[in-house]
Image (spheres, rainbow, N blue to C red):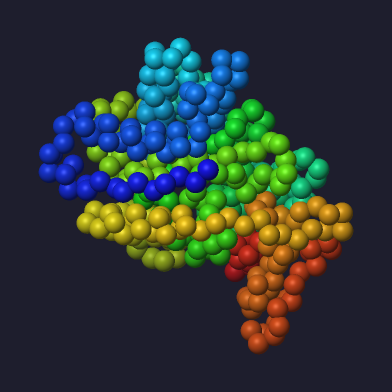
Amino acid sequence: MPVREQPVASYSRILAKTWSRDCFVRFIHTKVIKRLEATNFRVRDSTKNLKRKLLLPISGGISSITLLHVIDGHLQGQMSRTGRPAFEIEVLFITDGVQSDEDARKFLALARDRYPRHEYSITPLSMTESEGTHEDDAKPNPEDASDLLETLKSLTSRSDIASVALTHAIVRYAEASGCEGVLWGDTTTRLAEKILASTALGRGATLPWLVNDGVSPFTVPGSSETILFLYPMKDVLRKELKTYSTVISLPTIHVSERSTGAVVSSKNATIDNLMKEYFESVEKDYPSIVTNVVRTSSKLIASRETSTNTDGKELCCQLCGVPVPHGTFGIHGWGGSQDAEAGTSTDAPIPTDPVAATTRRYCYGCARSTLPV
């Protein structure tokens, strides 16, 4: 269900301290909860016999922990008023090899002590092999990328493929645990960063799923089992979030967000890092620019126009699992000339044979990220 965009209140009022502490807390809570309830996750949409569950992946950053704090308070309020919550949440932490398992367990233990009424799980980051098509009711899983990441020389490519792996790990866990959807902790600022970064990486076709509440791109058309992507923090700027965590004295149970530092050389920077640095500077004085980037992208409508193979099964990217319009796999499928098979830029587009077993069926973005450098 589409959500009507709400105007963002002037942040100058917050900076000028014309709001009381309680007013500012309600300001943030209202933004988050209104977006969540607009997707029909309200008490009246649930029953005592039907327990709805959502997955909340946490990275250890301020955004996901704040979202956990807000939703925990919201569910407690529902319990006290009606005797039942609109839904339950399961908190998931994925280890990516940067943090040790012991540190991850300590982190979850702190979160569980602070917010004890929820389920907590931990799982390693991994990608499993797929043929790039929907097999009956099975969801597409990406190709094993553990070895692929080691072969990529570009930092941007490694960051892009690692992000694909993380998204799929979360979606697969949500499906296995019986969750209706995933609660992403992306703020307005983070979404603006991802919008421009995804466009630069050739993943512009995925923008409607990246910023809008609704069915994820990995859902089989016609299937009764769907995974929703929900963005409750979509209307909250990152600087508002930092102020909020200070105002409520949010306990330091999160791992500090990694600082990328100033970009000295383009060789040592990823597109995602460049976008983060840009929007952090813009957000200070021109928050409306950040908001407009997200609002403009929110007007895009997701399309599932795809081709099928000889068995009538929908064709998807072999790596990221997103449906590919008309089977235009690879860079040359879109008329580009960066692929060795495409010849010169004046050549007519050469479509990839989507059925050939020897052909890598990658979408445009994955084909670009995996090009040999």
Q: Which residue is pictured at 60% across the width and 45% down the height?
A: 216
Q: Is residue 65 visible?
A: no
* Image quadrant assignment for residue 283: bottom left
The total number of labels drawn is 0
Residue 95 x/y as whole percent: 54, 35
Res 360 → quadrant: bottom right
Q: Relative to the observer, which residue lies in front, 104 or 65?
A: 65
Residue 297: x percent and y percent?
46, 58
Side of 155 where 326 appears, left or right: right
Residue reaching furthest to the bottom? 346
| Image quadrant assignment for residue 357 | bottom right
In this rendering, position of residue 261 left or right of residue 184: left
Q: Residue at x 41, y 27 (%)?
A: 71
- Residue at 34% x, 56% y: name it: 290
* Percent coordinates x, y for residue 354 in the rendering: 79, 63
In front: 282, or 323?
323
Residue shown at 61%/15% (left/top)? 49
- Determine whether, in the image, residue 134 is placed left or right of residue 121: right
